[in-house]
Amino acid sequence: MNSPTHTDDAHPYLRAATAGIRHHTRSLASRAQHTTSSADRMHLDVLHAHLTALHQLLDQLAEAARPPHPAAGRHLATAHTRLWQATAAVHDAFHLLPVADDTSAETECHPERLPKGPHVLTICQRHLAAGHVVRRKTTPSDLNTPLHGHTAPSSQ
């Protein structure tokens, strides 16, 4: 019989994910000292997957915080929007990097072909699916607000 997952059970996984990102950041930093290679598409694809999952978690936290703590819910909703902007920027950067094995490969998003598209476009499938959720909950003007434009009231 499966037992329900308790809230406390998720915290070790979040800590492990954070530790993994820190390790990867240190690894990239040390490698950058020895080589002139730039970010690659695989790194951005994996980072996009992480950001998309984090975005979903932040959305759930904002929804849970809103009724009992409206101000905290608004701050989390703002973080949710800003995280989506970062996720979209990573997706855009992915398409600006060259394809390592075939420079003639098509790298633009084509939503009409996503289910049968090339494997390299899994980031686009993920981005498109997450984008549908974002657009249901966020206004276009919120999505286009600059990152530094947030002026939330202080909690004093």
Image: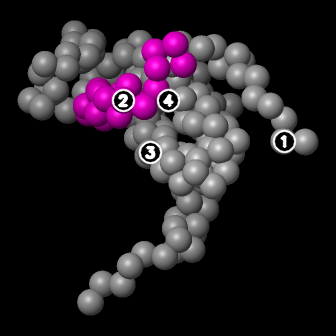
The residue labelled by disc 4 is 84
Q: How crowded is mark 3: few (under 14 residues within 10 Å), some or many (20 or more)?
A: some
Q: Which of marks 4 and 3 precedes in the sequence?
A: 3
Q: Is residue 57 visible?
A: no
The residue labelled by disc 2 is 136
107 up-or-down from 45: above or below: above
State the SS at label 4: helix
Q: Marks 2/4: CA distance?
A: 13 Å
Residue 155 is covered by the magenta coloring: no
Q: Residue at x 49, y 76 (%)?
A: 6
Magenta segment range?
A: 122-142
Q: Position of residue 36 (x, y in %)?
A: 59, 22
Q: Which of marks 1 and 4 precedes in the sequence?
A: 4
Q: Marks 2/1: CA distance?
A: 28 Å
Query: Which SS does the magenta portion mostly show?
Result: helix
Q: How crowded is mark 2: few (under 14 residues within 10 Å), some or many (20 or more)?
A: few
The amino acid sitting under disc 4 is Trp
Q: Which of marks 3 and 1 precedes in the sequence?
A: 3
Residue 155: mark? 1
The amino acid sitting under disc 3 is Gln
Q: Nearer the viewer, mark 3 or mark 2?
A: 2
Q: Marks 4/1: CA distance?
A: 24 Å
